Amino acid sequence: MSSTYTDEDDDYGDVRGDFWGRSPQSSYFEIAKTANQNIVEQELEVVFRRLAVAERMLEERGLDEALENEIHATAVDQDIDGRTASIFIDLVGRIVTQCE
């Protein structure tokens, strides 16, 4: 799945290009299989904790039906694809750095 998302600060350039010859998601899954599992679990916990914080912030701001519909509508979005790719790239970087 390709995307046109680029970071404001352009840390990763254009994520449409190959990331080590494959997608950020497939790179993560390949690294996660061979990396120290304690590190992989710790990093996944960080991602899930961040998701839980974001969900709580949405709920505290009143997650009504209109906002819920907007969330579902943007789930298929090029910007979201790019942000998802960036999360996988960050996750791979943090795992690889700790396993060195």
Image (cartoon, helix red, strand yellow):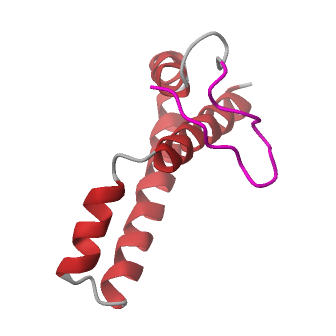
Question: Principal SS element in the magenta part?
Answer: loop
| Relative vertical location of residue 68 with respect to residue 22 in this rendering, above or below | below
Give me the residue at 48% from left, 43% from top. 78
* Residue nearest the viewer, comparing 62 with 54: 62
* Residue nearest the viewer, comparing 92 with 95: 92
What residue occupies the far top of the structure in this picture?
21
Q: What is the quadrant of residue 29 in the picture?
A: top left
Question: Which span is picked out in magenta?
Answer: 1-17
Give me the residue at 22% from left, 68% from top. 69
Give me the residue at 76% from left, 55% from top. 8
Residue 5 on image: x %, y %: 62, 43
Residue 66 on image: x %, y %: 23, 78
What residue occupies the far bottom of the structure in this picture?
61
**Viewed as shown, does residue 17 lie left or right of 58?**
right
Residue 21 is inside the magenta segment: no
Give me the residue at 48% from left, 63% from top. 50
Q: Quadrant of the N terminus?
A: top left
**Viewed as shown, does residue 6 lie left or right of 84?**
right
| Relative vertical location of residue 7 with respect to residue 96 in this rendering, above or below | below
Residue 36 on image: x %, y %: 54, 26
